Image (cartoon, helix red, strand yellow):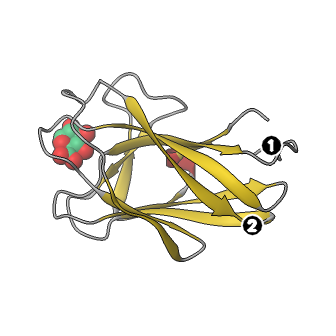
Amino acid sequence: AAPVQYQAESATISNGLVESNHAGFTGSGFVNYDNEVGSSVEFTVTAASAGPATLTFRFANGTTTNRPMDISVNGSLAADEFSFPSTGVWTSWTTKSTTVTLNAGTNKIKAVATTSNGGPNLDRVDVDAQSGTPDTVA
Ligand code: GCU
């Protein structure tokens, strides 16, 4: 099935702001994480069936410093200090993927900044359930 796109600006944001001042985002904006440990974005995503899914995060990091985040799925750590390296400038967006296991139905995917720089600017996450059954449309 085709990946389903979940916009960060529509997710649950804790200590971050929706902004649109750096071109190249999709949807209506992106999340600017507060520059602190623990700022987060939590997506509620739906999978048709339990199994592996590829998460593809689209982000920009206009600093020279990696902005790692812990990626958790339904409260369990799935990717420890997953790196969001420099993209050069804030208008340069790129993607990074990781594979996780989803439950059938609703899942919570949370991306939490682990350094005092906060997270990158986060545009969206694409969820590609690899089950062979169609994804539920967001
Ligand atoms: C700048 C930039 C923001 C970014 C911030 C940061 O202020 O304009 O989009 O989020 O740096 O360092 O996190």
Residue of label 2: 103
Q: Position of residue 58 (x, y in %)?
A: 45, 37
Disc number at residue 118?
Answer: none
**Quadrant field for ligand 1:** top left
* Secondary structure under the numbered disc 2 in the rendered image: loop
Front-most of residues 124 and 66 = 66
Vertical position of residue 119 compared to residue 20: above or below: below
Disc number at residue 137?
Answer: 1
Q: Position of residue 6 (x, y in %)?
A: 61, 44
Residue pushed farthest right?
133
Q: Nearer the viewer, mark 2 or mark 1?
A: 2
Q: Is residue 43 left or right of residue 112?
A: right
Residue flagged by tag 1: what amino acid is it? Val
Residue drawn at x 29%, y 53% as measured from the top left: 119
Front-most of residues 114 and 49 = 49
> Residue 123: which quarter of the image?
top left
Residue pushed farthest bottom?
75
> Residue 127: which quarter of the image?
top right
Question: Would you say the beta carbon of the disc 1 residue lies within 8 angstroms of ligand 1?
Answer: no
Q: Residues within 10 Å of mark 1 (few under 14, many from 20)?
A: few
Q: Position of residue 84 (x, y in %)?
A: 30, 45
